[in-house]
Image (spheres, rainbow, N blue to C red):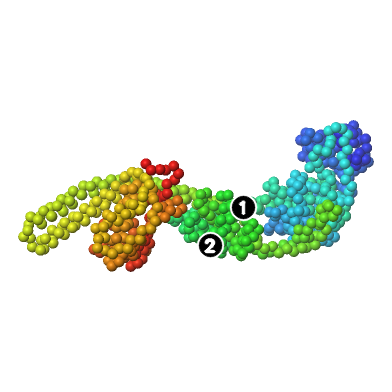
């Protein structure tokens, strides 16, 4: 023996120095030896030593053995054959309980019947470590706390760790005087670990807490579910009360039966919930797969999307598009605000809260639809999110005393003195999201990402095949167009020769020859345009700085024959230099300006405006006229090959000019678009990227 408390020395006398030397300690020494050898599951012992009836238990602390003695209760040990039927009946009651609150009520009754305490409470910890009393049994000597909550501050984190480490604790008399362990050798000091000790003294604050509660004796048994402190069985008496080691062990065994039953029920409920959510996931996946876009697939099944996480509203956000809102949701601008806030904290990971106003107070105005938010990002690079919403659930929480009150006296914090029921109205909080719901949201995100990636691979494969087909088609078009040029020229030439040779042809014959020539010239022009169109897709781009103002003046000069005799108000604004292939960009300007001249032809006075500016890393140019215009309903056809929005007999052309302009602009990495109104003119725009650092003229 290298250390002992003063009480142990008083009880055992000289025997404390070496138990093995005393015959009357032989039974205790034998139990300890067999326990250390692994032949006994427990070190518990009860018997007479030094004229006292004692009970003892041992545990290891590093390479030390700590042996604790208590005075045995006066009622003695209850025979095992009487206890076993009671435990068996209790186990049957547990399995027959309809729900967890009923199970906890059974537990409170059984533990109090075993121990004889005045009151037994069973409470469960919530996510914030507040304890809700869900089971209670008492004899009326102490007040009832059923349905009340004990704040997390009553059992701080350090105490919870000890409850998880040492499942059973007892304080037979809160009026005890703590005694130190006195060292009988050099190996015992302040560093001795008593975490597993039954008789380890508790904090004076806790003893004061017990007295304020009106109790002088307490016992607690931890409810450990899957290795986590799930709740506590807390027993109290108004007067000192001692429970034998045997009965404490039986209480611990019984409470762990309760923990096993709770774990089984929670796992069963979790599995059932996940199975139901898995079926909803399958339906949503099938809808997304069969739809052209995953957003349309989700939008087509609004009930399943909401039921997947038991939400009342949802929003689908895709970068650059208006939010798709389903069910009860905030307004689109508010949804966009939530997404902007998420970008600052979510870090690309799924995120949820039951109280959005607790994080951002300005969200209080959204409480009726979005107190709770579950959000999953779809893309790491774009603003694409899936959001689910839940409204606030206003509720009244009953506390065992005011949870926020701190009592200080003489510079020391004291436990609160009142445990009377205290009500608190809780607002701006929704039902919390559960783990199955969080996992369901994450699984849906994974499915969406998989669909998007698969579609991207399919699009890439199609693009590759399309590029190959386009090259083959361009080669074919070039070959055919090139081969057709000579025959059309021959037709035009021979028609001219025939008209010159045969001077006596009647009027109808001359008309036929002119029609042949005009048709051949039109076909030849079409072939030339096709050659140009094919050539643009094959030619290499040689970019350099282009003087846009000079280029536009050249285009106007080349159109003088077509503008001769017409009244045209040219409005030429600033034109920033461009970066591109001068020959190809000239073709774009020629086609756009020529169209403006052509489609203002019927007007007595034409107005053509040309201007440009640099903005957002682009050079943007505009050509506007007051001509015949076009119907915006057909704007998608405007830049297609052979697409004409005006009748061929009204305006000449092959229908390739705008398609050629688009191909050139897009090959330069730019954009081209237009607005128009029938009878009010057209407004064409195109942009070219501004060269980056290090790019210069070749």
Residue on which the image places disc 1:
435
* Residue positioned 82% across, 48% down in the render: 203
Residue 594 in sight from this viewpoint = yes
In the rendered image, residue 260, in percent from the top left (x then y), is placed at: 69, 49
In the rendered image, residue 613, in percent from the top left (x then y), is placed at: 42, 55
Left or right, residue 566 beside residue 266: left
Q: Quadrant of residue 559?
A: bottom left
SS state under label 2: helix
Left or right, residue 27 beside residue 665: right
Question: Toward the viewer: 585 or 99?
Answer: 585
For label 2, count other residues whose C-alpha is less than 10 Å away and answer few (under 14), some (14-19) or many (20+): some
User: Residue lying furthest left in this view?
Assistant: 504
The quadrant the N terminus occupies is top right
Q: Quadrant of residue 120?
A: bottom right
The quadrant the C terminus occupies is top left
Left or right, residue 490 beside residue 347: left
Left or right, residue 242 beside residue 96: right
| Of callouts 2 and 1, the N-terminal one | 2
SS state under label 1: helix
Distance from the alpha carbon under mark 2 to that under mark 1: 28 Å
Residue 431 in sight from this viewpoint = no
Residue on which the image places disc 2:
332
User: Relative to residue 498, is residue 541 depicted above or below?
Assistant: above
* Residue positioned 61% across, 61% down in the render: 363
In the rendered image, residue 660, in percent from the top left (x then y), is placed at: 31, 53
Q: Residue 694 — which label?
A: none
Circles 2 and 1 in contact, beta carbons < 8 Å: no
User: Relative to residue 332, is residue 258 depicted above or below?
Assistant: above
For label 1, count other residues whose C-alpha is less than 10 Å away and answer few (under 14), some (14-19) or many (20+): few
């Amino acid at each position: 023996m290298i250390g002992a408390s003063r009480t142990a020395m008083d009880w055992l006398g000289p025997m404390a120095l070496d138990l093995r030397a005393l015959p009357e300690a032989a039974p205790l020494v034998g139990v300890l030896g067999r326990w250390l050898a692994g032949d006994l599951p427990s070190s518990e012992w009860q018997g007479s030593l030094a004229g006292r009836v004692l009970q003892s238990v041992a545990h290891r602390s590093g390479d030390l053995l700590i042996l604790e003695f208590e005075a045995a209760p006066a009622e003695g040990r209850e025979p095992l054959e009487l206890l076993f039927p009671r435990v068996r009946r209790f186990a049957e009651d547990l399995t027959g309980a309809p729900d967890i609150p009923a199970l906890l009520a059974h537990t409170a009754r059984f533990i109090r019947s075993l121990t004889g305490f005045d009151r037994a409470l069973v409470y469960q910890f919530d996510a914030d470590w507040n304890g809700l009393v869900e089971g209670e049994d008492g004899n009326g000597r102490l007040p009832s706390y059923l349905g009340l909550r004990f704040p997390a501050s009553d059992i701080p984190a350090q105490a919870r760790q000890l409850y998880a480490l040492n499942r059973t604790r007892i304080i037979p008399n809160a009026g005890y005087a703590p005694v130190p362990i006195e060292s009988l050798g050099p190996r015992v000091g302040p560093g001795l670990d008593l975490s597993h000790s039954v008789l380890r003294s508790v904090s004076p604050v806790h003893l004061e807490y017990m007295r304020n509660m009106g109790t002088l004796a307490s016992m607690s048994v931890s409810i450990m579910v899957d290795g986590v402190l799930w709740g506590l069985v807390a027993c109290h008496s108004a007067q000192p009360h001692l429970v034998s080691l045997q009965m404490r062990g039986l209480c611990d065994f019984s409470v762990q039966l309760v923990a096993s039953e709770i774990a089984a029920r929670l796992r069963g409920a979790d599995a059932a919930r996940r199975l139901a959510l898995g079926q909803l996931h399958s339906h949503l996946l099938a809808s997304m797969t069969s739809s052209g876009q995953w957003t349309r697939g989700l939008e087509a099944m609004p009930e399943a999307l909401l039921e997947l996480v038991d939400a009342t509203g949802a929003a689908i956000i895709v970068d650059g598009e208006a939010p798709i809102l389903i069910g009860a949701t905030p307004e689109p601008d508010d949804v966009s605000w939530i997404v902007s806030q998420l970008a600052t904290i979510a870090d690309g990971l799924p995120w949820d809260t039951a109280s959005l106003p607790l994080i951002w107070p300005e969200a209080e105005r959204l409480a009726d639809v979005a107190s709770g938010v579950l959000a999953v990002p779809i893309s790491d690079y774009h603003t694409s999110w899936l959001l689910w919403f839940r409204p606030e659930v206003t509720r009244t929480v009953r506390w065992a005393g005011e949870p926020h009150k701190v009592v200080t006296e003489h510079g020391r914090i004291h436990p609160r003195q009142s445990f009377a029921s205290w009500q608190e109205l809780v607002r701006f909080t929704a039902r919390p999201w559960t783990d199955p719901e969080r996992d369901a949201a994450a699984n849906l995100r994974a499915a969406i990402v998989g669909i998007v990636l698969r579609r991207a691979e399919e699009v890439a494969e199609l693009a590759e095949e399309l590029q190959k087909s386009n090259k083959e088609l361009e080669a074919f078009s070039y070959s055919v167009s090139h081969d057709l040029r000579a025959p059309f020229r021959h037709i035009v030439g021979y028609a001219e020769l025939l008209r010159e040779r045969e001077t006596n042809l009647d009027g109808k014959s001359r008309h036929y020859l002119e029609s042949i020539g005009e048709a051949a010239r039109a076909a030849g022009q079409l072939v030339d345009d096709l050659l140009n169109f094919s050539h643009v897709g094959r030619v290499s781009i040689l970019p350099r700085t282009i003087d846009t103002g000079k280029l536009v003046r050249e285009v106007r000069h080349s159109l003088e024959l077509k503008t001769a005799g017409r009244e045209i108000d040219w409005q030429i604004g600033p034109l920033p230099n461009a970066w591109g292939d001068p020959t190809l960009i000239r073709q774009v300007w020629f086609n756009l300006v020529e169209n403006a001249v052509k489609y203002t032809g019927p007007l007595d006075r034409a107005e053509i405006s040309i201007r440009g500016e640099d903005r957002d890393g682009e050079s943007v140019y505009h050509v506007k006229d007051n001509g015949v215009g076009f119907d915006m309903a057909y704007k998608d056809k405007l830049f297609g090959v052979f697409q004409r929005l005006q009748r061929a007999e009204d305006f000449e052309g092959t229908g390739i000019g705008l398609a050629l302009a688009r191909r050139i602009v897009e090959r330069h990495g730019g954009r081209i678009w237009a607005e128009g109104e029938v009878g009010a003119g057209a407004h064409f725009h195109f942009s070219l990227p501004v060269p980056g650092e290090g790019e210069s003229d070749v």
